[in-house]
Amino acid sequence: MMTMTRYDIINRFISQRGYLSFLEIGTARGEAFHAVRCERKVSVDPDPRTPATFHLTSDNFFLTCNEMFDIVFIDGLHECNQVYRDVMNSLGVLNPSGMIVMHDCHPTTERMQEYVENFTGGYEWTGDVWKAFVYARSTLPYEMYVLDYDWGCGIIDTSIIRKPATGLPDCMDSMTYADFVAHPEWMNFRR
Protein backbone atom coordinates (compact mmCIF):
# COMPACT_ATOMS: atom_id res chain seq x y z
CA MET A 1 0.00 0.00 0.00
CA MET A 2 1.34 3.42 -0.94
CA THR A 3 1.87 5.95 1.85
CA MET A 4 1.78 9.62 0.98
CA THR A 5 2.82 12.59 3.05
CA ARG A 6 1.05 15.94 3.16
CA TYR A 7 3.74 17.44 0.93
CA ASP A 8 3.45 14.56 -1.57
CA ILE A 9 -0.26 15.39 -1.83
CA ILE A 10 0.41 19.11 -2.21
CA ASN A 11 3.14 18.51 -4.81
CA ARG A 12 0.83 16.22 -6.78
CA PHE A 13 -1.86 18.92 -6.98
CA ILE A 14 0.73 21.57 -7.90
CA SER A 15 2.05 19.36 -10.70
CA GLN A 16 -1.35 18.21 -11.99
CA ARG A 17 -2.90 21.66 -12.03
CA GLY A 18 0.10 23.79 -12.89
CA TYR A 19 -0.16 25.79 -9.69
CA LEU A 20 2.50 28.51 -9.28
CA SER A 21 1.86 29.93 -5.79
CA PHE A 22 1.69 28.25 -2.38
CA LEU A 23 0.77 29.58 1.07
CA GLU A 24 1.42 27.62 4.25
CA ILE A 25 -0.29 28.50 7.52
CA GLY A 26 1.74 27.01 10.39
CA THR A 27 5.34 26.28 9.51
CA ALA A 28 6.90 24.73 12.65
CA ARG A 29 10.25 23.23 11.57
CA GLY A 30 9.51 23.87 7.90
CA GLU A 31 9.40 20.22 6.85
CA ALA A 32 6.42 20.58 4.52
CA PHE A 33 7.36 24.07 3.35
CA HIS A 34 10.83 23.00 2.26
CA ALA A 35 9.50 19.83 0.55
CA VAL A 36 6.85 21.63 -1.52
CA ARG A 37 7.96 22.38 -5.07
CA CYS A 38 6.29 25.56 -6.26
CA GLU A 39 7.47 28.71 -8.02
CA ARG A 40 6.26 31.11 -5.28
CA LYS A 41 6.09 29.98 -1.65
CA VAL A 42 5.02 31.95 1.42
CA SER A 43 4.73 30.67 4.99
CA VAL A 44 3.21 32.13 8.14
CA ASP A 45 3.91 31.19 11.76
CA PRO A 46 3.89 33.42 14.86
CA ASP A 47 6.89 31.64 16.40
CA PRO A 48 10.06 33.60 15.51
CA ARG A 49 12.13 30.41 15.84
CA THR A 50 10.46 28.93 12.76
CA PRO A 51 11.74 29.40 9.19
CA ALA A 52 8.47 31.12 8.23
CA THR A 53 8.40 33.96 5.70
CA PHE A 54 6.17 35.98 8.05
CA HIS A 55 6.26 35.72 11.84
CA LEU A 56 2.75 36.71 12.85
CA THR A 57 -0.59 35.05 13.52
CA SER A 58 -2.59 33.89 10.55
CA ASP A 59 -5.37 36.32 11.50
CA ASN A 60 -2.92 39.24 11.30
CA PHE A 61 -1.37 37.93 8.10
CA PHE A 62 -4.75 37.79 6.36
CA LEU A 63 -5.55 41.35 7.46
CA THR A 64 -2.61 42.66 5.44
CA CYS A 65 -2.22 40.04 2.69
CA ASN A 66 -2.58 41.51 -0.81
CA GLU A 67 -1.36 38.46 -2.70
CA MET A 68 -3.36 35.60 -4.23
CA PHE A 69 -2.40 31.92 -4.09
CA ASP A 70 -3.22 28.77 -6.06
CA ILE A 71 -2.97 26.38 -3.12
CA VAL A 72 -3.08 26.95 0.64
CA PHE A 73 -1.91 24.47 3.26
CA ILE A 74 -3.44 24.90 6.73
CA ASP A 75 -1.41 23.33 9.53
CA GLY A 76 -1.40 26.08 12.17
CA LEU A 77 -3.14 26.19 15.54
CA HIS A 78 -5.04 22.89 15.66
CA GLU A 79 -8.18 24.33 17.23
CA CYS A 80 -11.40 24.02 15.25
CA ASN A 81 -12.54 27.64 15.48
CA GLN A 82 -9.12 28.97 14.41
CA VAL A 83 -8.87 26.40 11.62
CA TYR A 84 -12.30 27.37 10.30
CA ARG A 85 -11.25 31.04 10.35
CA ASP A 86 -8.09 30.07 8.46
CA VAL A 87 -10.22 28.27 5.86
CA MET A 88 -12.53 31.24 5.40
CA ASN A 89 -9.62 33.71 5.25
CA SER A 90 -7.77 31.45 2.81
CA LEU A 91 -10.75 31.49 0.47
CA GLY A 92 -10.30 35.26 0.28
CA VAL A 93 -6.74 34.94 -1.05
CA LEU A 94 -7.32 31.87 -3.22
CA ASN A 95 -7.16 32.15 -7.00
CA PRO A 96 -10.14 30.80 -8.98
CA SER A 97 -10.02 26.98 -9.13
CA GLY A 98 -7.58 26.98 -6.23
CA MET A 99 -7.34 24.42 -3.48
CA ILE A 100 -7.02 24.30 0.29
CA VAL A 101 -5.34 21.36 2.03
CA MET A 102 -6.01 20.98 5.77
CA HIS A 103 -3.63 18.74 7.74
CA ASP A 104 -4.56 16.51 10.69
CA CYS A 105 -8.20 15.74 9.87
CA HIS A 106 -8.08 12.11 11.07
CA PRO A 107 -7.34 11.53 14.75
CA THR A 108 -7.24 7.82 15.55
CA THR A 109 -7.75 8.19 19.30
CA GLU A 110 -9.75 10.58 21.44
CA ARG A 111 -6.57 11.83 23.08
CA MET A 112 -5.13 12.89 19.71
CA GLN A 113 -7.91 15.42 19.20
CA GLU A 114 -7.88 17.07 22.61
CA TYR A 115 -7.78 20.85 22.84
CA VAL A 116 -4.47 22.61 22.29
CA GLU A 117 -4.25 23.82 25.89
CA ASN A 118 -4.49 20.18 27.10
CA PHE A 119 -1.77 18.86 24.78
CA THR A 120 1.27 17.85 26.81
CA GLY A 121 3.40 16.35 24.05
CA GLY A 122 4.94 12.91 23.79
CA TYR A 123 2.26 11.46 21.50
CA GLU A 124 0.73 12.06 18.07
CA TRP A 125 -1.67 14.99 18.14
CA THR A 126 -4.08 16.38 15.56
CA GLY A 127 -6.18 18.70 17.68
CA ASP A 128 -9.83 19.00 16.67
CA VAL A 129 -9.17 20.09 13.07
CA TRP A 130 -11.68 17.47 11.94
CA LYS A 131 -14.53 19.55 13.41
CA ALA A 132 -13.60 22.53 11.20
CA PHE A 133 -13.58 20.25 8.17
CA VAL A 134 -17.02 18.82 8.96
CA TYR A 135 -18.45 22.28 9.58
CA ALA A 136 -16.89 23.60 6.35
CA ARG A 137 -18.51 20.72 4.44
CA SER A 138 -21.89 21.87 5.74
CA THR A 139 -21.33 25.52 4.76
CA LEU A 140 -19.13 25.65 1.64
CA PRO A 141 -20.24 24.93 -1.94
CA TYR A 142 -17.11 23.00 -3.01
CA GLU A 143 -15.94 19.46 -3.50
CA MET A 144 -14.54 18.36 -0.14
CA TYR A 145 -12.99 15.10 1.01
CA VAL A 146 -10.25 13.75 3.26
CA LEU A 147 -7.34 11.83 1.80
CA ASP A 148 -6.60 9.23 4.46
CA TYR A 149 -2.82 9.73 4.57
CA ASP A 150 -0.52 11.50 7.04
CA TRP A 151 -3.20 11.88 9.76
CA GLY A 152 -5.78 12.94 7.15
CA CYS A 153 -5.50 15.73 4.61
CA GLY A 154 -8.77 17.57 4.09
CA ILE A 155 -9.19 18.84 0.54
CA ILE A 156 -11.33 21.83 -0.43
CA ASP A 157 -11.37 21.96 -4.23
CA THR A 158 -12.93 25.21 -5.40
CA SER A 159 -12.79 24.11 -9.04
CA ILE A 160 -15.75 21.79 -8.38
CA ILE A 161 -18.94 23.45 -7.18
CA ARG A 162 -21.29 21.32 -5.08
CA LYS A 163 -24.13 21.98 -2.72
CA PRO A 164 -22.97 22.00 0.90
CA ALA A 165 -23.27 18.56 2.46
CA THR A 166 -26.44 17.89 4.42
CA GLY A 167 -27.03 15.89 7.58
CA LEU A 168 -23.96 17.30 9.31
CA PRO A 169 -23.85 19.04 12.72
CA ASP A 170 -24.38 22.79 12.58
CA CYS A 171 -22.11 23.60 15.53
CA MET A 172 -18.45 22.64 15.90
CA ASP A 173 -18.49 22.89 19.69
CA SER A 174 -21.17 20.21 20.04
CA MET A 175 -19.25 17.60 18.02
CA THR A 176 -17.57 14.81 19.99
CA TYR A 177 -14.98 12.19 19.17
CA ALA A 178 -17.72 9.57 19.59
CA ASP A 179 -19.58 11.37 16.77
CA PHE A 180 -16.44 11.28 14.64
CA VAL A 181 -16.07 7.51 15.12
CA ALA A 182 -19.79 6.84 14.55
CA HIS A 183 -20.00 8.97 11.38
CA PRO A 184 -16.97 8.41 9.10
CA GLU A 185 -19.15 9.59 6.20
CA TRP A 186 -18.86 13.12 7.61
CA MET A 187 -15.23 13.16 6.46
CA ASN A 188 -15.88 11.77 2.96
CA PHE A 189 -12.67 9.70 3.19
CA ARG A 190 -10.78 8.77 0.04
CA ARG A 191 -7.50 7.05 -0.73
Image: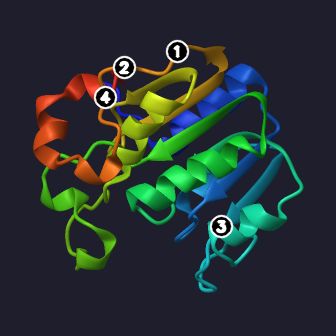
Q: Where is residue 102 in the image (x, y as percent from the top left)?
A: 49, 44
Indicate the amino acid at tag 2. Thr
The mark tally for this picture is 4
Dot 1 or dot 3: first in sequence order is 3
Q: Label 2 belongs to which residue?
A: 166
Q: Label 4 belongs to which residue?
A: 168
Is residue 59 found left or right of 154 in the rendered image?
Answer: right
Is the residue marked by circle 3 packed among few (<14), some (14-19), or many (20+) residues within 10 Å? few
Q: Label 3 belongs to which residue?
A: 59
Is residue 26 found left or right of 145 in the rendered image?
Answer: right
Indicate the amino acid at tag 3. Asp
Pick the residue in front: 179 or 96: 179
CB-based contact (under 8 Å), mark 4 and mark 3: no
Residue at 63% x, 73% y is 57
For the view shown, which residue lies furthest in the bottom direction? 48
Q: Where is residue 120 in the image (x, y as percent from the top left)?
A: 22, 79
Label of residue 163 in the image: 1
Indicate the amino acid at tag 4. Leu
Marks 2 and 3, how far apart at CA = 29 Å
CB-based contact (under 8 Å), mark 2 and mark 3: no
Q: Where 58 falls versus 180 (above or below)?
A: below
Pick the residue in front: 45 or 49: 45
At mark 3, the secondary structure is helix
Dot 4 or dot 1: first in sequence order is 1
Nearer to us of marks 4 and 3 is 4
